[in-house]
Amino acid sequence: MMIRDKADKFMINLKNRLYLNELAKDNKGMGVVEVILIIVVLVGLAVIFKSKITSIVNTLFSKITSKVNTF
């Protein structure tokens, strides 16, 4: 009985290792996760620096408008 238990445990361990190896090879969703993380970081930075971004854009548009009016 003891040898059978060891053999069963060995087979279960072997199956688990093979399953984990297959999961490690399957990286289809990696690109999606990376893109989502990049988007989250960019949105977070935009929220943090919202006032700075707004002031820079307003300054640029005012300069563009003044240059266009001189033509």
Image: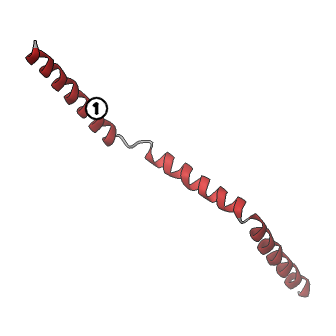
- Residue at figure coordinates x 18%, y 23% from the top left: 9
- Of residues 70 and 27, the one nearer the viewer is 27
From the viewer's perspective, tell me whether residue 46 is left or right of residue 24.
Answer: right
Q: Residue at x 83, y 81 (%)?
A: 63
Q: Can you give x and y, in whole percent of width and height, for residue 43 in the image?
A: 66, 56
Residue 53 lies, in percent from the top left, at: 75, 69
Judged from this view, the residue extending furthest toward the bottom is: 70
In the image: residue 69, left or right of residue 11: right
Which residue is drawn at the image coordinates 78% and 67% (left, top)? Answer: 51
The image quadrant that residue 44 belongs to is: bottom right
Which residue position is annotated with label 1?
A: 19
Task: Looking at the picture, tell me which residue is in the foreground, 2 or 61.
Answer: 2
- Give the farthest residue toward the top: 1
Label 1 CA crowd tier, 10 Å (few <14, some 14–19, many 20+): few
Q: How far across and how far down the image is residue 57, in percent?
A: 78, 72
Q: Which quarter of the rendered picture does the C terminus lie within?
A: bottom right
How is the rendered protein coloured?
secondary structure
Amino acid marked by disc 1: Tyr
- Which quadrant would the N terminus be assigned to in this image? top left
Residue at disc 1, secondary structure = helix
The residue positioned farthest toward the right in the image shown = 69
